[in-house]
Image (tube, helix red, strand yellow):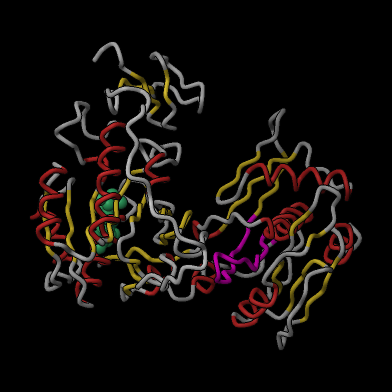
């Protein structure tokens, strides 16, 4: 065994010939562990061929996969319209963010709608899960509950019970007795996931795997688990906030980037049907440094408040602090403001934040970010009834973005009456919205901040 031993990085899954303190592939420290080889047979398949596979053409009639509704709209939306049978789903998130709570609620909801559901906890005892169910008022739901970490036992049980949905909480606690390494190690997580995903496909059971996320924001253990499953959902949120966002980062059965919004309350997660209203609810009276971005998350418009603070810096290298946005994007926008509009931020600390613990990844947020920065720097408030969207190019031009009509409709619904949009964006007609279209950032600065 020692002869064929290989080493794998637990952070990125890269294989190494020998142990090292740092992984060359991803740069993580202390992440390389020794692994038992997966198979010790001959390296090539040789002359003995298999039976061959059956081929079809692309036009083969295939009914859309049957879907089961969870009864929780926010969850159904993220799944692409409900749970697809015989699919494998990974739900990742920080410890304590609420994954077990979400999935217990989902299991109860599925079970109450008539789906046979199994919930296997490898982290908590059955008694603990029962106590949680009681607290959530779900004790009456016909969910079959088990506490086990040995995958052999779990697969035997699944084979016997044949549920429509099995929830495995969490994949890091599962272990296979034919593999030598400890539970949570790369080889265990990889092999256990592979076994469960194969089981899901061959027996027609939908499987949801819970996965913990490392400090660096990746599912602990190999990234390969993400490649194995059909759908990867991340459950995210700031500890200090009660909002939780379930985001589809990969979905073979629906749009990626779709989000579901929840609120953590004393009795479990509550769905938030109108996230825009929620994210804007903390907005006080119009203050400099605040701009409302009309964004799109997946297929749904979401308004968020971008907040900026700009202050003289006591440091040689001024601070650039960003929460909820990409920091590279901030640097780009600052550079464009400086180079194209002659508005320098040298010597100024810049703090940028998306209110409510939301994360914005859309480039269309550029204009709202620029507006918040300018508003903070010039100490001029942006009109409280105005939303903004548009991508900023390096030349300072405003690039059109998609789904303009959706953005404007949502803004109008929430009582906004003015919008600033890129000039080449196709506008639908939205009643009661005064939309100003602008070609570049210079025009915007002149218009809103009076010639800059
Ligand atoms: P949990 O689902 O155990 O998180 P995870 O499985 O992702 O590790 O959630 C734990 C947190 O949620 C815990 O800090 C308490 C909080 N919580 C509530 O606020 N309300 C509730 O009704 C429940 C069940 C948990
Ligand atoms: Mg848990």
Which residue is found at the position 58% from the left and 56% from the top?
360
Q: Nearer the viewer, residue 415 or 391?
A: 391
Region rendered in magenta? 288-307
Hey, which residue is sitting farthest right in the picture? 451
Hey, which residue is sitting farthest bottom in the picture? 431
Which residue is found at the position 33% from the left and 55% from the top?
88
The main secondary structure of the magenta stretch is strand
Q: Quadrant of residue 365?
A: bottom right
Q: Quadrant of residue 264?
A: bottom left
Q: Nearer the viewer, residue 173 or 268?
A: 173
Q: Is residue 272 above or below residue 29?
A: below
Q: Is residue 368 above or below residue 8?
A: below
Indicate yes or no whether the magenta region holds residue 293.
yes
Indicate yes or no whether the magenta region holds residue 431.
no
Q: Nearer the viewer, residue 70 or 58?
A: 58
Q: Quadrant of residue 1?
A: top left
Q: Position of residue 168 (x, y in %)?
A: 23, 52
Q: Quadrant of the C terminus?
A: bottom right
Hey, which residue is sitting farthest front in the picture? 47
Q: Position of residue 43 (x, y in %)?
A: 36, 23
Marker count (numbered): 0
Q: Position of residue 65 (x, y in %)?
A: 38, 70
Q: Position of residue 393 (x, y in %)?
A: 80, 52
Which residue is found at the position 12% from the left and 47% from the top?
148
Ligand 1, image quadrant it occupies: bottom left
- Left or right, 425 with respect to 184, comes to right
Which residue is found at the position 31% from the left and 20% from the top?
34
- Left or right, 450 with respect to 168, comes to right
- Left or right, 342 with respect to 417, comes to right
Q: Is residue 80 above or below residue 71?
A: above
């Amino acid at each position: 065994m020692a002869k064929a031993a290989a080493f794998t990085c637990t952070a990125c899954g890269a294989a190494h010939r020998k142990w090292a303190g740092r992984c060359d592939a991803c740069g993580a420290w202390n992440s390389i562990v020794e692994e038992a080889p997966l198979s010790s047979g001959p390296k090539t398949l040789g002359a003995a061929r298999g039976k061959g596979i059956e081929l079809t053409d692309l036009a083969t009639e295939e009914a859309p996969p049957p879907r089961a509704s969870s009864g929780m709209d926010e969850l159904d939306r993220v799944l692409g319209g409900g749970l697809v049978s015989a699919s494998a789903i990974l739900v990742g998130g920080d410890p304590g963010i609420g994954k077990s709570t979400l999935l217990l609620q989902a299991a109860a909801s599925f079970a109450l709608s008539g789906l046979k559901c199994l919930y296997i906890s490898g982290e908590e005892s059955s008694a603990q899960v029962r106590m949680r169910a009681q607290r959530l008022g779900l004790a009456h739901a016909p969910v079959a509950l088990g506490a086990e970490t040995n995958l052999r036992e779990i697969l035997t049980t699944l084979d016997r019970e044949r549920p429509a949905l099995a929830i495995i909480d969490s994949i890091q606690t599962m272990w296979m007795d034919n593999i030598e390494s400890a539970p949570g190690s790369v080889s265990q997580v990889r092999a256990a996931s592979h076994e469960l995903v194969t089981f899901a496909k061959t027996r027609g059971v939908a499987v949801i795997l819970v996965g913990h996320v490392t400090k660096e924001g990746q599912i602990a253990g190999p990234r390969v688990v993400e490649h194995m499953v059909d759908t990867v959902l991340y459950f995210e949120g700031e500890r200090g906030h009660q909002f939780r966002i379930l985001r589809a980062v990969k979905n073979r059965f629906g749009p990626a980037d779709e989000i579901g919004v929840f609120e953590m309350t004393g009795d479990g997660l509550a769905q938030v049907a109108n996230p825009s209203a929620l994210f804007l609810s903390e907005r006080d009276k119009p203050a400099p440094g605040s701009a409302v971005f009309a964004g799109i998350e997946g297929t749904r418009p979401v308004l968020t408040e971008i907040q900026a603070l700009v202050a003289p810096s006591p440091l040689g290298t001024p601070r650039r602090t960003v929460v909820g946005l990409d920091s590279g994007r901030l640097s780009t926008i600052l550079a464009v403001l400086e180079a194209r509009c002659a508005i320098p931020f040298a010597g100024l600390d810049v703090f940028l934040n998306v209110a409510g613990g939301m994360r914005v990844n859309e480039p269309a947020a550029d204009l709202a970010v620029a507006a918040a920065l300018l508003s903070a720097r010039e100490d001029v408030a942006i009109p409280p009834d105005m939303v903004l969207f548009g991508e900023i190019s390096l030349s300072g031009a405003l690039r059109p973005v998609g789904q303009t009509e959706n953005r404007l409709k949502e803004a109008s619904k929430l009582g906004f009456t003015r919008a600033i949009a890129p000039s080449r964006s196709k506008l639908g007609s939205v009643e009661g919205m005064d939309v100003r279209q602008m070609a570049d950032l210079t025009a915007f600065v002149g218009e809103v901040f009076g010639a800059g």
